């Protein structure tokens, strides 16, 4: 089980990303638009810098839904490799079979 503080910190980041998503997307589009004047693009970058760092989507860490483990995360299932194996062996994940040869 991951530290509860790490899990909570990641949840706070998710909330901030959701809160600033529209503003961040608009500024990012302006900053990346090469048809605009350099001054406008620079102003957009400066406004992006004023947004809190944790509002940046790249700061979110994928974590296991059951244990909070950050490593070995499978996006398709939303859990880590250890939990995937445990649940797969118990037959709780439809369509997943343990290979044997």
Image (spheres, helix red, strand yellow):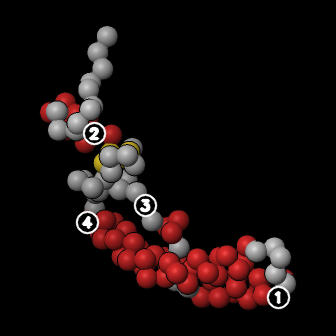
As displayed, is residue 42 above or below residue 77?
Answer: below
Nearer the camera: disc 1 or disc 4 = 1
Residue occupying image coordinates x 27% and y 31%: 96
What numbered label is drawn on residue 57?
none
Residue occupying image coordinates x 78% and y 87%: 40
What numbered label is drawn on residue 61?
3
Question: Mark 1 packing: few (<14 Cα in 10 Å), some, or many (20+)?
Answer: few
Residue 27 percent across, percent down from the top left: 64, 82
Residue 65 percent across, percent down from the top left: 27, 55
Residue beneath disc 4:
4
Alpha carbons under labels 1 and 4: distance apart: 44 Å
Residue occupying image coordinates x 52% and y 81%: 22
As displayed, is residue 40 above or below residue 79?
Answer: below
SS type, badge 2: helix
Q: Quadrant of the C terminus?
A: top left
Residue beneath disc 1:
39
Alpha carbons under labels 3 and 2: distance apart: 18 Å
- State left or right for residue 56 relative to residue 89: right
Nearer the camera: disc 4 or disc 2 = 2
**Upstream in sequence: badge 1 or badge 3:** 1
Residue 84 percent across, percent down from the top left: 27, 39
Alpha carbons under labels 1 and 3: distance apart: 34 Å
**Upstream in sequence: badge 2 or badge 1:** 1
Residue farthest top in this picture: 101
SS type, badge 1: helix
Residue 3: image quadrant is bottom left
Q: How many marks?
A: 4
Q: Check whether the beta carbons of the residues at disc 4 and disc 2 lie within 8 A of each other.
A: no
**Upstream in sequence: badge 3 or badge 2:** 3
Q: Check whether the beta carbons of the residues at disc 2 and disc 1 lie within 8 A of each other.
A: no
């Amino acid at each position: 089980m991951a530290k509860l503080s790490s899990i909570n910190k990641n949840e706070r980041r998710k909330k901030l990303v959701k809160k600033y998503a529209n503003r961040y997307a608009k500024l990012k589009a302006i900053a990346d638009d090469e048809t605009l004047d350099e001054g406008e693009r620079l102003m957009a970058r400066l406004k992006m810098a004023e947004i809190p760092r944790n509002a940046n989507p790249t700061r979110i860490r994928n974590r296991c839904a059951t244990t909070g483990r950050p490593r070995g995360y499978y996006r398709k299932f939303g859990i880590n490799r250890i939990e995937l194996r445990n649940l797969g062996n118990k037959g709780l994940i439809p369509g997943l079979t343990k290979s044997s040869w």
